[in-house]
Amino acid sequence: MRNFKADNQLNMFKILEKKMLNPTICKMVVEAPRIARAALPGQFLIVRADEPGERIPLTISDFDREAGTVTIVIQPIGASTRSMVNDFSEGDSFADVAGPLGNPSEFVKMSPEELAAQRVVFIAGGLGTAPVYPQAKWLHEHGVPVDVIIGARTRDLLIYEEEFGSVTDNLYMCTDDGSYGFKGVGTARLEALVAEGKKYTQAVAIGPMIMMKFSALTCKKLGIPIWVSMNTLMVDGTGMCGACRLSVGGVTKFACVDGPEFDGYLVDFDEAMRRAAQYKAEEGLSNGK
């Protein structure tokens, strides 16, 4: 058991629940009352596992104001996230958790009249499924019709199906290999739904960069405005390191302070994917490759 509680501080970032959602993705419920009270859908946290640890940006996958908890979902990629999943258990504590950071989702800023006119579809892929949950939940609580499309390569990689069951009007599961639900990618499911007569005023895509790129292209073809979350580019989470800069409508933005959500029509995904690829070598070194 690892516990990094300071001698004279309350143990405020205890891991209350840890669960593997699939072979590669871990969910943790963390005690953080002040963050839970202020959190909104679309925002993220910076987690430092131990005193010498690096700052890891993680999107908020849920929050409970009454219980004083926030939920994070982690996929081990580098040394730090691998340590968080492998070395920390229920009852342990993280050194610190900062947040909520970033801007909340655009619909949080809408008036009741604007919300009443919305019909939203989410396209979620892989780890990006988890941060879709608080957004769909918020909209559902505010009476907005919500459809969610969740995609993965195979059935055993799908996550959050049970959680979404209570906060969506329609939930569509997709697998590339056809092992569960619709056979094909989420964008193909969206095109099929629109062809069947479904109408949406807004789409939101969260997942791998290439998936968000094709979600934006598909939505543009279908005439559906789309927001995408560029959290995968973030490193420092404060706008100081510059790692998460991207071009949006020809203007330089920073995912951590200007986003993480942006108009998908305007994001230069090819540039963003080139930037993200620059860190692959560093990740390989941290994993001993």
Image (cartoon, rainbow, N blue to C red):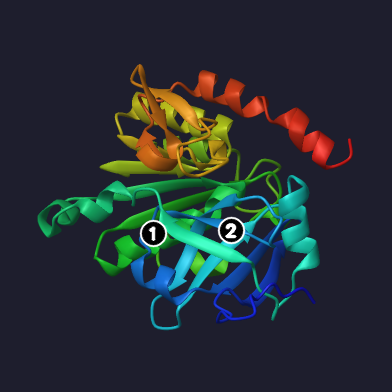
Give the residue at mark 2: 47
Q: Where does residue 190 sit, x and y in percent of width and height?
A: 44, 40
Would residue 175 appear left or right of 255 to someone viewing this image? right
Seen at 71% across and 56% down, the residue is 52
Foreground mark, 2 or 1, reads: 2
Q: Position of residue 182 (x, y in %)?
A: 58, 47
Q: Is residue 162 visible?
A: yes
User: In 3D space, how far apart are the residues under numbered discs 2 and 1 (Cα atoms)?
Assistant: 24 Å
Say which quadrant the N terminus sits in: bottom right
Give residue 134's position: percent from left, percent from top. 42, 62
Q: Which callout, 2 or 1, points at the residue further toward the start of the chain?
A: 2
In front: 62, or 241? Answer: 241
Q: Amino acid at mark 1?
A: Ala
**134 up-or-down from 75: above or below:** below
Residue 119 vertical placement versus 274 (above, below): below
**Where 235 falls versus 31 (above or below)?**
above
Please rate how many residues cluster around mark 1, counting C-alpha atoms within 10 Å: few if below 14, some from 14 to 19, many from 20.
many
Q: Are marks 2 and 1 in contact (CB under 8 Å)?
A: no
The picture places residue 247, in percent across and down from the top left corner, at 41, 22
Nearest the camera: 23 or 166?
A: 23
Quarter residue 192 falls in: top left
From the viewer's side, name the closer residue of 139 and 98: 98
Question: Which residue in the structure is indicated by mark 1?
Answer: 136
